[in-house]
Amino acid sequence: MAATPHTPECAARHPFRPLHEGRLVFPDFDVQDVQPYIDWRLLYDEYGAEAGSDRALQLHERATALLKHIAEQRLLKLQAVIGIYAVRPEGDNLLLTDTRGHTTRLSSCGALGSRLSPSGDYMGCYAVTAGIGRRELCAKYAIEEDDSSSELTAALSRLLTRAFAEALHTFVRREMWGYAADERLTPRQIADREYRGERIDIGTPSLPDPALRDALHGLLAVGLTTEMQLDAAHNPSPEESLYGVMLADRR
């Protein structure tokens, strides 16, 4: 197997040792703590509404009212597992080792290994969802023939899941890993990914292989600690769930 090429810049940097290695489970995160991280532009784009237009303002009003109802009645449950592990590149694979010495292989990671120190580094992993209860709530609206609320609920669930991922990544950067402990970014700057480090969802161009979700699902013990599951084709349930990895900025 060919060795992963490493840039001189990467090889010269020393990995930032995390303040807290291992895994954290969030079984029921508060919607209100995630709401500041919502990028409403994604909702406007989904509905074809131009930001700042009357249609976008009306959509935002409807969405925030529905979100308030969801939060007050606890109609959606937000769950996640995150972890930081020692990692070593091996060809286009990555070998992650937990605090007990157990190793998990992430296969077909392409050039991701070239952004890690060849002598050993650290990587964050996550599985997040805001979709627990979404199916039941949409079914309720369908029975009531309220297709508009059903559609908006599904959109909000996707939006909340992305916001939840950003909220947890912020916690990792500032507190769990600690390489950006002095970070002071606005929610808009976070949505625009102006932070140090990187969060990469599985299924995006950098990590296109959906089978990687299985490795993270096992490493993080997602099925044992949350209601998230994967089917035989590596598709998550709830379907808006996100799996991925986090890289530190070693500046």
Image (cartoon, grey):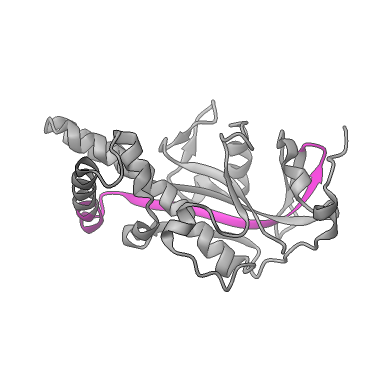
Q: Position of residue 133 (x, y in %)?
A: 30, 43
Res 132 seen here: no
Q: Choose top left, top right, bottom left or bottom right for residue 244.
A: top right
144 relative to 151 in the view: left or right: left
For this orientation, the residue located farthest to the top is 233
Quadrant in the picture for the N terminus: top right
Camera-side residue of 94 and 148: 148
Residue in view at x 45 percent, y 43 percent: 228
Residue in view at x 61 percent, y 60 percent: 196
Q: Is residue 55 above or below residue 8?
A: above
Res 27 seen here: yes
Residue in view at x 61 percent, y 48 percent: 245
Camera-side residue of 75 and 112: 112
119 relative to 55 in the view: left or right: right
Label tally = 0
Camera-side residue of 121 and 55: 55
Q: Position of residue 5 (x, y in %)?
A: 85, 41
161 relative to 17 in the view: left or right: left
Q: Position of residue 214 (x, y in %)?
A: 60, 37
Residue in view at x 28 percent, y 37 percent: 49
225 relative to 2 in the view: left or right: left
For this orientation, the residue located farthest to the bottom is 182
Quadrant in the picture for the C terminus: bottom right
Q: Position of residue 173 (x, y in %)?
A: 58, 63
Part of the protein shown in magenta: 68-92
**Is residue 88 part of the magenta span, yes or no?**
yes
For this orientation, the residue located farthest to the left is 144
